[in-house]
Image (cartoon, rainbow, N blue to C red):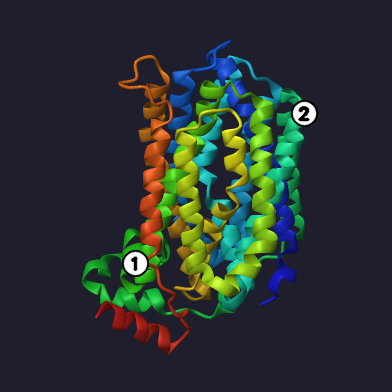
């Protein structure tokens, strides 16, 4: 284990990639509205298309993320990280060239396909890379620092977007994405999961599940690929992982819903534009960066990642519920400043899940967790995009523009109550103890 010193090149790659991706977020809403509904503040077509794109990306992630995560356990993280970084460049190049309607539709198609193939997998592989390099006791803090670097890129990207023109924004995004890819290929040192030591957890569980899974194990080389049976066996073996999976699903459902509708809700409700979106995102990013880099490493040893997870979910629930009844344009800014604890949710979940398997299965477990999150991202836009469009229109059954956000707040409440059931489980140790534990759990 090289510790945090061995993660510097990964952090640089995360920062450059995040900066290039985030810098385009404040502008994409205005670009979409201008291409589809010029001169309007509310556009149902834009909301529906964004929802469809997010749902399709979720479908692809459900399939691709566990597959890529599992393959990285066999062939290394670096080779698999190349795929999502390469795919992320193409959509920005299209909008950097032109934002006319026909080019927007080209961007929409390419972005959707790229998201289906690579969205979520880069984050999954980065988490697995950290798990390869950092021991169990320091893993939660390392995940928090990784998320903090991502938040720092979030702040830098939104700040840059505040001062760049729309055309220049997408040009910078494309260039930074290319630099991130080249930097990663040159400087990032590949990790060998577990140093070649096999962890027998899934092997032992598969033997217990032999009657249901014998045909899969008999398929030679293809048994190395992840299957639904792998996920089911992992859930059976670890109640802690199954509870974390439920929390991840509902948390991702809320995040996906907010991603699909929040900016359109703010534009229709308070006529926010690109600069106000950038200001709002920058406030959130600054708080997230400070919390993840400095506050989380202090809090984890004191209160534990389980309580930190519950705290983040509770505050997130309150934030979303208040968003739904926002009565003035200053309310979103106040909520952005109060969201400091919500950024603890994902690092805490990833750390809890990573401790349930050994070093040679980190890619699989992070891929499975990302796949569960992606399934929520399929459902969220299909449900909440039409709901938001309905309640923002003149045909709403009753006046409540933020009704979809109220529903998202209730979903976050479910995640909070489920998180209270998670109890700290001792890490699975390579060798006999892990096998015994799995057998005892199944019995």
Looking at the image, is 60 positioned above or below residue 131?
above
Q: Nearer the viewer, residue 152 or 333?
A: 333
- Quadrant of residue 143 in the image? bottom right
At a point 46% along the width and 54% down the height, the residue shown is 314
Residue 18, position as x, y percentages in the image: 67, 46
Question: Is tag 2's residue or tag 1's residue first in the polypeptide sequence?
Answer: 2
Quadrant in which the C terminus is drawn? bottom left
How far apart marks 2 and 1 lie (CA) works out to 47 Å
Question: Where is mark 1, residue-wise?
Answer: 235
Up-down relation of residue 217 to residue 29 (above or below): below
Q: Quadrant of the N terminus?
A: bottom right
Q: Nearer the viewer, residue 40 or 394?
A: 394
In the image, farthest residue toward the left? 211
What residue appears at the point 52 percent right and 57 percent down from the top-left corner? 346
Up/down of 337 relative to 106, above or below: below
Whether residue 181 is visible: no
Image-based side of 358 in relation to 250, left or right: right
SS category of the residue bearing label 2:
loop
In the current view of this chain or complex, which residue is farthest to the bottom? 432
Residue at the top extreme, as displayed: 39
Which residue is label 2 attached to? 164
User: Percent x, y for residue 121?
Assistant: 54, 52
- At numbered mark 1, what does the secondary structure look like: helix, strand or loop? helix
Is residue 50 shown to the viewer in this render?
Answer: yes
């Amino acid at each position: 284990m090289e510790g945090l010193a061995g993660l510097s090149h990964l952090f640089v790659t995360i920062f450059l990639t995040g900066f290039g991706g985030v810098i385009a977020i404040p502008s994409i809403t205005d670009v979409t509205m201008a291409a589809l509904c010029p001169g309007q503040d509310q556009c149902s077509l834009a909301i529906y298309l964004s929802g469809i794109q997010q749902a399709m990306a979720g479908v692809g992630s459900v399939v691709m993320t566990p597959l890529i995560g599992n393959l990285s356990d066999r062939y290394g993280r670096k080779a698999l990280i190349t795929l999502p970084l390469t795919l992320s460049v193409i959509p920005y190049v299209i909008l950097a060239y032109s934002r006319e309607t026909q080019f927007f539709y080209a961007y929409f198609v390419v972005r959707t396909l790229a998201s289906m193939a690579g969205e979520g997998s880069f984050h999954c592989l980065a988490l697995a890379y950290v798990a390869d390099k950092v021991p169990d006791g320091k893993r939660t803090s390392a995940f928090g620092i990784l998320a903090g670097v991502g938040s720092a890129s979030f702040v830098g990207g939104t700040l840059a977007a505040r001062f760049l023109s729309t055309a220049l924004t997408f040009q910078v995004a494309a260039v930074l994405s290319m630099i991130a890819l080249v930097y990663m290929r040159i400087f990032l040192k590949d990790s060998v999961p577990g140093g070649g030591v096999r962890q027998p957890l899934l092997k032992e569980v598969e033997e217990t599940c032999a009657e249901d899974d014998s045909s899969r194990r008999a398929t030679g080389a293809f048994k190395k690929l992840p299957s639904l049976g792998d996920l089911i066996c992992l859930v059976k073996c670890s109640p802690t992982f199954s509870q974390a999976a439920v929390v991840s699903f509902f948390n991702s459902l809320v995040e996906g819903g907010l991603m699909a509708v929040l900016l359109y809700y703010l534009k229709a409700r308070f006529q926010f534009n690109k600069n106000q979106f950038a200001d709002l995102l920058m406030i959130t990013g600054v708080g997230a960066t400070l919390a993840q880099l400095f506050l989380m490493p202090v809090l984890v040893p004191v209160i534990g990642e389980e309580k930190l997870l519950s705290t983040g979910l509770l505050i997130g629930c309150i934030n979303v519920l208040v968003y739904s009844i926002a009565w003035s344009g200053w309310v979103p800014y106040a909520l952005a400043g109060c969201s400091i604890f919500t950024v603890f949710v994902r690092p805490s979940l990833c750390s809890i899940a990573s401790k349930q398997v050994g070093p040679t299965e980190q890619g699989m477990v992070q891929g499975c967790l990302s796949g569960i999150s992606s399934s929520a991202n399929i459902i969220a836009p299909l449900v909440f995009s039409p709901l938001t469009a309905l309640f923002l229109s003149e045909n709403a059954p009753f006046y409540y523009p933020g009704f979809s956000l109220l529903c998202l707040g209730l979903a976050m409440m479910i995640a909070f109550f489920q998180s209270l059931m998670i109890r700290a489980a001792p890490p699975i140790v390579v060798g006999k103890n892990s096998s015994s534990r799995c057998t005892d759990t199944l019995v």
